[in-house]
Image: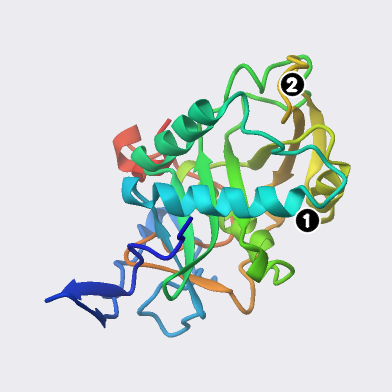
Amino acid sequence: MDTRQAYPGTVLQQGTLRSFRPAQPPSPPPSRVRPGLQAWPATGGAAVAPLQIARANAQHLDTVLGLIEDARSWLWRKNTDQWEKPWPDPAARDARVRAGLSHDKTWIVWDGDIAAATITITTRRNNAVWANPACTANLAERAVFVHRLITSREYAGSGLGAQLIDWAGLRGCREYGAKWIRIDVWRTNTGLHDYYMSKGFRPCGICADLDYPSGALFQKSVAGIRVPASPKFTETPAGSQLTEPSPTWRKPPSSTSLPSDLRS
């Protein structure tokens, strides 16, 4: 599948592509930002990283599916049955991807016109997966849940995936008051378990439904995350300026004040 489509940083004019530079995003509400801390840079600011992250939409379905197939092809060469076949079937898998796109929960990291990575984040947990007592996390505490975190193999080993995780956590903390980043991981892929633990995640139980393949549960505290000195991507065209977690957080007046991708 062609992952080079409908990307930020270009516009179509009379059948040709020309570059543009998005305008500087507005400053975040001061009430939810710790003063004096470096914000995760946005395109148009003083620091611009080589890559850009932007919210995806329905026209990016083939792009996200292409990244999934890229990851599946690589996993086949590893000692794991992860994504050996779409779960529970291709139609259901594609429906989940479409839902993430249509509800503004999916993001793509672009290197020019190349999709380098994708991530889907939400504040609503899947109660069939995250349920006590099999899950040992305190589910009353606010969290962001990460799905379909995929880095193109061309960018593997660059640290892009780790920064995407921290970006999601900081964004969730700032916009929603999230204390945790949570992710369900393929049960049998112990190498992936080790990877997440090396990035600060800790096991927090399992999904009680043993037929669900991605049933190893992990969480990471947002409190320890810091904005990297050299971010690998900037937000575009008007994403949130992210800051390090604040010790206190004031609840927004209503859920509609949250970005659409973080509304429950």
Type of residue at label 1? Lys
> In percent of the image, x 58 and y 74: which residue is there?
232
The residue indicated by pointer 2 is: 207
Q: Which residue is more in the foreground, 238 or 62?
A: 62
Q: Is residue 63 above or below residue 221?
A: below
What's the coloring here? rainbow
> In percent of the image, x 52 and y 43: which residue is there?
121
Q: Which residue is more in the foreground, 42 or 161?
A: 161
Instruction: Tell me if 21 is positioned left or right of 245 in this view.
Output: left
Residue most extreme to the left: 14
Closer to the N terminus: mark 1 or mark 2?
1
Q: For the residue labelled by badge 2, is the local secondary structure a helix, a strand or a loop?
A: loop
Q: Which residue is more in the foreground, 68 or 183?
A: 68
- CA gap, disc 1 to disc 2? 22 Å
Counting from the top left corner in percent of width and height, residue 25 is at 31, 68
> In percent of the image, x 73 and y 54: which residue is there?
74
Instruction: Tell me if 203 is positioned left or right of 260 in this view.
Output: right
Q: Quadrant of residue 220?
A: top right
| Quarter of the image that includes the C terminus | top left
> Label 2: how many residues lie within 10 Å, few (<14), some (14-19) or many (20+)?
many
Tell us which disc is closer to us: 1 or 2. Answer: 2
> In percent of the image, x 66 and y 60: which residue is there?
161
The residue indicated by pointer 1 is: 199
Counting from the top left corner in percent of width and height, residue 87 is at 63, 28
Q: For the residue labelled by badge 1, is the local secondary structure a helix, a strand or a loop?
A: loop
Q: Which residue is more in the foreground, 75 or 195?
A: 75
Counting from the top left corner in percent of width and height, residue 157 is at 74, 69
Type of residue at label 2? Cys
The reply to whether residue 158 is in sight is yes
The reply to whether residue 36 is in sight is no
The circle on residue 71 is none
